[in-house]
Amino acid sequence: MLDTLGRPLESLRVSVTDRCNLRCAYCMPEEEYRWLPRADLLSYEEIARLASAFREVGVRRLRLTGGEPLLRRDLAHLVRLLEFEDLALTTNGILLAAQARELREAGLHRVTVSLDTLRPERFRELARRDSLEQVLEGIEAARREFGTLKLDTVVMRGVNEDELEELLSYARSVNAELRFIEYMDVGGATRWSHEKVLSRSEILERVGPAEPLAGRGSAPAERFQLPDGQVFGIVASTTAPFCSDCDRARLTADGRLFTCLYATRGTDLREPLRAGESQAELAGRIRAVWQARGDRGAEERALLRRRGSFVSLEELRENPHLEMHTRGG
Ligand code: SAM
Ligand code: SF4
Ligand code: SF4
């Protein structure tokens, strides 16, 4: 099953909650947010039913995300209900130390932790909470349970651009593969400007000589190897987007399907699910949406001469589904 640009649907990101225990400057910079009504949130059984409809149309990889997914009670229960070739979790790590073992035992394969700084003071400024210690404990626990993990760092000029080497050596010390992510103008990034983006080429300049590795496939990160053998990635969504290989769909915690991070409209799957549609009918809906898909949001944004944040604060207040923390990053 291909979309209008010939791309298959192979991976799904499922946001299990729009709530978060951090307020990262690039994602949730405002003082107040309007949350999805609780009654709209899918139960774990409902998520599992939709997930198997996605599996039926070709999805092989599923990633749990949010908001902060570990805020949702007993996430391990959901993990037990999901059967995928690759089952991963993206988390800010704060609640990971207490849950890593149970999640692995429930069948989770891989963990990615977001880590933008190793300095407590900077963490507090960037995320507006004093939680670096818990994040580092979460990373240690993930390493113990899973052997290895990924770390994602959003790089912002004037914020953490001076820490790239320290982050790399920390990643080496915990057996993690680090990925530098360009600051994107998407969702709640209302403070975004071009000047604050440290581009892929600037990141490479700072890191020093690195050899590109082949075999990227549909993965968002380009991978590189340092002379000492350490491998790291760069996700250049802003300056070198990769929409032509994008095989990803997103499902929000209230059951809306989005076919692009920049899509302004989604398709509600909750109502047909709650109305009792069969697995085959739900799969048919997903198939119809995917076959009509022509999104290439980041590439279109990159062509713009003048670029500010993608959506205004007024639009975000009006429509929380446009938020990154709602659609799951
Ligand atoms: N709360 C979890 C976390 O932070 O890992 C999962 C959800 S979060 C929305 C998923 C990812 O989106 C994080 O790695 C975060 O760094 C990334 N993200 C959010 N806003 C971004 C932006 N404006 N530019 C680039 N990445 C962003
Ligand atoms: Fe930060 Fe993730 Fe929370 Fe966004 S959802 S504020 S990126 S921890
Ligand atoms: Fe995929 Fe949209 Fe991101 Fe392009 S902008 S890589 S189409 S999610």
Image: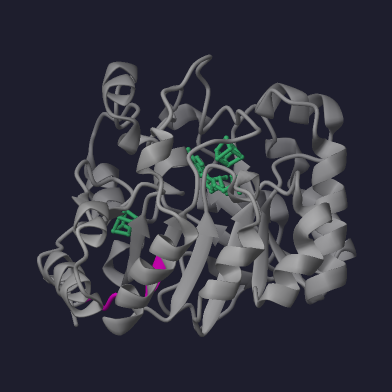
| Magenta span dominant secondary structure | loop
Picture residue at 53% right of the left edge, 52% below the top = 201
Residue 205, position in %: x, y?
A: 63, 52
- Horizontal arrangement in the rendering, residue 160 relative to residue 68 (left or right): right
Quadrant location of residue 39? top left
Residue 190, position in %: x, y?
A: 41, 24
- Number of numbered markers: 0
Q: Is residue 30 visible?
A: yes
Picture residue at 53% right of the left edge, 73% below the top = 81
Is 5 located above or below residue 158 in the figure? below
Residue 189, position in %: x, y?
A: 44, 30
Query: Is residue 202 part of the magenta span, yes or no?
Result: no
Picture residue at 40% right of the left edge, 75% below the top = 218
Query: Is residue 9 part of the magenta span, yes or no?
Result: yes
- Horizontal arrangement in the rendering, residue 180 relative to residue 59 (left or right): right
Quadrant location of residue 71? top right
Residue 284, position in %: x, y?
A: 15, 74
The region drawn magenta spans 7-12
